[in-house]
Amino acid sequence: MNVANLQLEGLMMAVAAINNALVHQGVLSIDAIDEALRKAESSVTSDERVYEDMSPAHREAICFPLRLLQLANLSQDETGVPPFAELARQVGLTKDDAGDLRDREGGVG
C-alpha cells in the first residue's frame, strides 16, 4: 500500500477520534458534526470543476474521507469509533451504481 494512503488513513481516524471526544465532552453534538460534514461534501460536489473535469472515480475519491468521517460520527459510542477497515467497507456498501450515498437524508452517510 502507498505510504500516503496510510498517512491519510491515520489522519481520518485522528479526526474521527477528535470528533468523538468533542461529542463526549459536550462541545459538539453528533448532529452538529454530521451537518458540518454534509455541508463540506455539498461544497465539494457543487464545485463545477469537480463535475466537469473529473471522472466519477476521482469524484468518489474526493468524497470518500467526508463520507468515512460521517459514518464514524454516526457509529461512535463512548468507547470510540469503529476501525478504518470497517468504516471503509461501510462507505462502499452505501454507494449505489451512480456512486452516490444511498439514503442521504436518512442518515446512512
Image (spheres, rainbow, N blue to C red):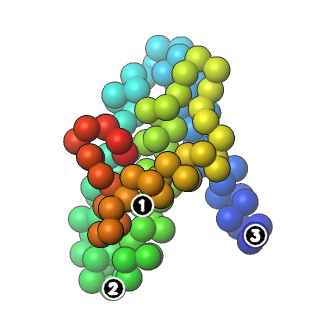
What residue sits right under mark 1 in the picture? 63
Residues tagged 2 and 1 counted as in contact (Cβ below 8 A): no
What residue sits right under mark 3 in the picture? 1
Q: Residue at x 64, y 20 (%)?
A: 79
**Quadrant in the rendering for residue 35:** top left
Q: Residue at x 32, y 68 (%)?
A: 97
**What is the three-letter code of the residue carrying label 3?**
Met
Residue 46 in percent (x, y) is at 24, 65
Q: CA distance from mark 1 to mark 3?
A: 20 Å
First along the sequence among labels 1 and 3: 3
- Judged by depth in the image, the label closer to the viewer, 3 or 2, is 3
Disc 1 packing (10 Å; few <14; some 14–19; many ≥20):
some
- Judged by depth in the image, the label closer to the viewer, 1 or 3, is 3
Q: Secondary structure at mark 1?
A: helix
Disc 2 packing (10 Å; few <14; some 14–19; many ≥20):
few
Q: Secondary structure at mark 3?
A: loop
Residue lying farthest bottom? 53
- Judged by depth in the image, the label closer to the viewer, 2 or 1, is 1
What residue sits right under mark 2 in the picture? 53
